[in-house]
Structure formats: C-alpha cells, structure tokens
Amino acid sequence: MWRDAVLVCSKDLRIEARSRVGLNQVVPFAAAVLLLFGLALGPDRHALEPAASGLFWIAVLLTVVLAVQRSFAVESADSARDGLRLSGLDPAGIFLGKGAAIVVQLLVLEGLLTIGVALLYGAQLSGGLVLLAACLTASIGLAAVGVVYGAVSSGVRVKETLLPLLFLPVAAPVLLGATKAWNAALAGTPAHAGIWLSLLAIFAVLYVAVGIAAFGPLLEDS
Amino acid sequence: MALAVSLREAVALADRFPLLAGVTLDVGEGEIVHLSGPNGAGKSSLLRLCCGLLSLASGTGVVLGHDLAVDRREVRREVGYLGHASFLYEELTVEENLRFALRASGIHSTEAAQRASAAMARMGLAGRLPGTPIVKLSAGQRRRAAIAVVVGRQPRLWLLDEPHAGLDQDSRTLLDGIVTEARAGGATVVLSSHDLGSAGALADRVVHLAGGRVVPAPAEDLHEPLADTAVVAPDPTRAPEAVHVA
Amino acid sequence: MSRLDATGDPVLTERDDDVTSGAVAFGETAPAASPPPRAATHASRASVREDVDDATTTEAGPADGGAAPSAVSPKAMARGSAPRAARSDRVVRAVGTAALVGVAVTVWLGLWVTPNAVDFGNLVRLLYIHPPLAWVMFIAYGVATFSSLLYLWPRTRHARFDRLAGASAEVGVVFTGLTLVTGSVWGRPTWGVWWTWDPLLTTTALLFVLYLGYLALRKVPGDRETVARRSAIAGLIAFLDVPIVFVSVSWWRSLHQAPTVDVANGHLYVHGSMAWTLALGFVSFTLVYVWLMVHRYRLAVLRDREDDEGLDAALAERWAEGTR
C-alpha cells in the first residue's frame, strides 16, 4: 500500500510540475476569490480584517474542489476509474497517494494565500506555529474527504456539480475548526486554538481511515 | 488443455442494457482467438469482462483460474488489456508512462526500467520518442506506446480491442509479430477486429459475436437471408465454427 | 459469489427476493424461491410477468389513506402468498388510519384543548409538533444509515436494505425540512430572528444538505448494485460527519462570546394534558413515518420490478439482433 501511495503521489506531482495547472489556474482562482470577497465586503478594513480567517478558509475549501477534480481528470478523463483499476495498484495506496499530492499542493496554496490575506485584508500574522498546524491538519482532512468524493463522482457525467454538493457540507467542521484556530492565532491567543486543532486532527484521522477502507469498494463500481 | 477463459451464459449489463446476453466461450491456453462481429455485437464488452472491468450480472466466468464473480482484482493483475482509451498520462513521456505502468503492476523498479526499454525497442519507439510527452505524439504512436505497456507487462492473457486500428502497415506487421511471439511464450491472445483479413491470418480460430451472444459463422454471401442458414435461437452449447482465411 | 438456487440457476451476487415474489408488503421475504429474473430461461421470464400482473392488482395508491385493494390475482393465490399479502395490507391500512387519526387528534388537542404555557403563551403549541418531527427525522436517518451498513456487510447484502435506505432518506429529508421550518417559526417570536445558530438547528440544517446530496447521488444513472453500493458508502461517510458537526457547532457557540440572541430562559413545565398531547404527537408522527415508509418502499420494489421486466425484454431484443 505505501509503495503504491508513493508511486501515485510522485506521479501526480510530476504531472502537476509538467502541466502547471495548479500554478496557472488553481492559485489564480483562489486569489480571485479573495479579491471578490474583498469587493463584496467593502473597502473598509474593519469589516474585512476580523473576517480574514473565515474568508481564507472558504477560499481554500472551494479550491479543494478544483484540485480534486483536476486530480481525477488526469486519469484518462472519463475512463478514470477503469485506468486506476486496470493499473493493478492497491486502492488504498491510490487514495493515500492522490491525497498526499493534493495536500502538498494545498500547503503551497495556503502559503501563498496567507500572504494574500495579510496584504488584502490587513490581517496581522502571529502565532505562526498554530497557523501552520491548522493548515496541515485541515489540509489532510480536506484532501481525504475530497479524494473519496472525487472517486464517487468520477465515473458519472454530472461530476462537476455532484462533487461540490457532496464535499462542501461534509467539510463544514473543518471550515469551522480551522477558522477558529486561525482566529485564535491572529488575535494573539494561540492557546485557545488547542481545542480546534484537536477537532481538525480527529477529523483528519477519521477520514483518512475511512478513505483507506472505502476506496477499494468505491472503485469497484461496475 | 487448460482453459485460459471459460464463460457460461455470461450476462453483463450497463444500466439495464445487456451488453452481453449470455456468452458461452472457451479459450484454451496458448490459443489466438479472433472475435468478429458487427458494431454493437459486444466484442469490446466481452474483452472488458475478461479483463475484470465489467461485472457479471449472471452466468459464470473463470479467467486464468480466477472466478470473475469473486476475484476481479486478481484477474486485472494478470491480464494485459489494450482498449480504445490508452490509459496513458498525457503530460508524462512514453518512458515515464511505461515505467509507471510496469511498477504499478508490481514489477520492481530496476526490472521495470529494463522491461520498459526492451518494450520500447520492440515497438520501434526509438530516438526522441521515449522522451516525448504523450500529448505530442500522433495517434499511431500513442497506440504503439499503449501496446508497449502490454508487451512490458508480459501477461498470461492478452486482450486486444481492435489493435490494428490506427496503425500503418509497418506497425501492423510489427504487432502481428509480437502477438505470435507472445503465443510462443505461452500466452493466450484474444483480439477483436472488424477486419477478418489481417487478424484472421493470425488467429487459430474465429468466434462470431452478434447481439451479445456467440453465434455460428454467418453465411458467406451476405445477400442471402440468414433465416435459411442460421437457427433462430442460437444454441450456446454448440462450439462456434472456425473460419479460416486463406 | 456465484450461488445456485433451488432450480440450479446461478443467482446474483445481491439477493433480491422481494422483486421476484408476489409479496410487496413491507419487509416480507419471498414465500417461495423463484429463479431470479435475470436468468435467461423461459421459466423465469414467465414468473416475472406473473409478478408484474400481481403488482398491478395489489398496488396501493397513497391518496387513499393506506387502503390496499383486497383483490389478489388467482396466480398469487395459487402460490399461497395471498393470505399473507392481504393480512399485511390490512395492517398497513390500520397503521395509516391510526396515523391520520393520531395527527388529527394531536392538532385538535394542541390547538384548542391544551392551555397556554406561562412563559411561551401560544407558542408552546408548536411543542407538540416540532420535537416529534425532529425525533422522526433522527429515526429516519438512523434507519437509512443502518440499512446502508447492512447492505455493505457481505452477509446481509440484500436489495431490500438499499431500498430501505433510499426510502428512509427521502422521508427523512421531508421531516428535516419540516423540523427546520417549525424550529424557525418557533424562533421568530421567541428570539426575534428567523434563524439562530443554535447547535441543534445548525446541525439539522447541515443534515438537510448532506442528505439532499445523498439523494442526488442516488439519482445518478447506473445499474442497481452500483448505485446501491456507491450511495451506501457515501451515506455512511456523510453520517460519520454528523456528530463531528454537532460537536464543533456546540463548541463554536459556547466558546464564542455571548451571542446577541440567547435562548429564552422561560421554564416549561409539561404536565397534564400537555404531556399527553406531546406523547400522542410522538406516537402519531412515528406512525406517519411508518406508513410513508411502507408506501415508498413498495414504490421502490415496483420500480425495480419494472426495470427487471424491461431487462428481459431487452435481452430478447438483443438475441433477435444476433439472428437478423
């Protein structure tokens, strides 16, 4: 399983490095979302700054949907599941590999978005360790749920609309926890983030386990 | 003779539509079988069933000793399938694709590299081609790369869906040579094609499919109404007649 | 797993007795093992056609309050399933009537008979409906999740659990909607807002969306087993999320600074006629749930049967293709 995971992860990252879709399309999308939030909530920093964490994490959540769709789109487009099944790879390994590749991309994205949030919304960055921990655990949880639902929706024609519908509600606790953790860190009271970080960690562990168990049956659809 | 593939009244569905409506077929080890039939007859579906991609709705099927109803994952590891989709990653080069595919089927890294080079050489993918991303190759070159994957895996059962499609004459000859070599190495080959001529010469026997079932060979003269020569409800237990093309 | 049934025909991986037998009643198993409709034999095709004839004569319309026609085709009678079918239809009809009566009485009691509460005034009358609706919602989701589990577990894999899960999720979504509406209506006079981010209400709203997604997934085309398995897995994953959501929203509320709107601190003593009405409300709505489930389940069985019949026709057409 681990060997297959490493294989798939490196393959996905290599494809990303070649095609630069993440860099060229996904990051700009997230940046555009941040900008649009800024436009919607007004130029007054007093409205934006307190909301900075929440807006950041919503932008991340929306981006995960795109990242997952891209991850499955590279697998021979519409015969994604066939390709994965025929490859002989262990499904749990495929899950971990794709998830890990998405986590890497998410971390890069979050780094860039952090700068964006500091610039656009005037967020005062502090409590770096908490910010980092929240990003890590949240990304793992989001990637896990995303890859599972990505597999569920990859074989169907309505996948573009199905994936967000399935993914976003389930990801709600991550949004909540990560935003609260970031709020605590940005407000200078990182200790308050402890409970939220544990929530994120539990979510991540739970859904990684679910993914490992369920990915095999999910691929076996037809 | 040991059987590589053994199907009895196999039914496979897509939604409610029966792709295969009761196929009974035996393929012995080391045979080369040519699947022939009109469009929509179920040739691709039969190949997909045998490589474990399609599930059996009813009937029984045993491929390389594995029961299709139970063990499809094991079947997939041991067969080499060439389908319409190439299952190659567009952004990666031919060599990277080959190495990935071979390592994915469980072959160790160094051996995978060796087999990849050998397969590419065999398929005539030389010079700048191994280092070219798939997206930049022509359709025929992609096909050859896909075939190279099967060659590299050295499976016991080869399932080729219209392998000659999109290949020029040289490539076709190359492929025929490879198929013959595979059989010499003990593998079984099942390939489908509209073109009786090129594939027929290779094959030990021909299996005719129509309407999702195995049917007797159609009349030579297509203008003659079939009612005179074929039975209305084809008897699945009768072995299909072989047609040898001179 | 390839198994052979009594007549020696291979059966499907997933058992589906309800569809092949004449019994359409909720939860009943086939009285006799008949060959699965997908086996390509003349006998099975004939039996499927018989079943469809039975289905058209025993189908119950939802509009008539649970009444099912007692006429049963002679074929079903000959197979000995008639007495069981008729009995269960009577039970369902009784349930439906009881549910209707119960709800009517609850409404009457709630609106006219019970007194106002000290702090809540007339608003308390929602009490007789809102908690029962929420209760049924939880039951519905519990049933849906448990059925999904049973479907995925190899030993209990049976089409009926998938149908149960789908039916329960649909009914559950309806009750969730009602719960949200009644909760919101309660909130407006009490707290002055149409919506408050109360943990229960927020979790309920999320549950609503989660299961709408589940239902959307079930509608995606695919063959029966594929849809069943895919939905079951997705459903379980969504269900796992619910406690996490609830916990996180509770923390969110309690750890936040005091919210501008707070739950009204009125005391509510439920006693006497109020207690009876509340209890009646719970019972009646549970009966409504059961009745809705029976009919929704039957609908699912009939739909599957129709599909299978269509399959036999499609098989026949396919053979004809081959001999043209």
Image (cartoon, coloured by chain):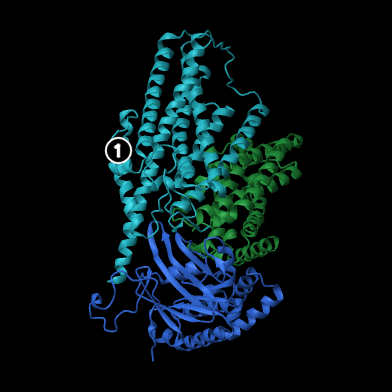
State the quadrant of the N terminus of chain A.
Answer: bottom right
Residue B223 image offset from top left, x and y in percent? 23, 81
Examine the rendered structure and indicate whether residue C200 appears above or below residue C231. above
SS at circle 1: loop
Name the residue at 44% across, 69% down: B46
Q: How far from the left and from the top, in percent, is residue B112?
A: 67, 76
Q: Is residue C321 above or below residue C100?
A: below
Given the image, what chain letter belongs to the residue carrying mark 1? C
**Residue in front for this viewpoint, A193 or A128:** A193
Which chain's colour is blue? B
In x, y percent, where is residue C60?
Answer: 32, 35
For residue C182, side relative to residue A93 (left or right)? left
Chain rendered green: A
Q: In this view of the protein, can residue B213 be seen by the observer?
A: yes
Mark 1 highlights which residue?
C72
Residue at coordinates 48% horizontally, 53% vertically from top-left? C226
Q: Quadrant of residue A4?
A: bottom right
> At which x and y percent is residue A21?
57, 61
Query: Residue B85: in sight, yes or no?
Result: no
In the rendered image of the structure, the colour used to display chain C is cyan
Residue at the image point whose x is 50% and y is 45% from the top: A165
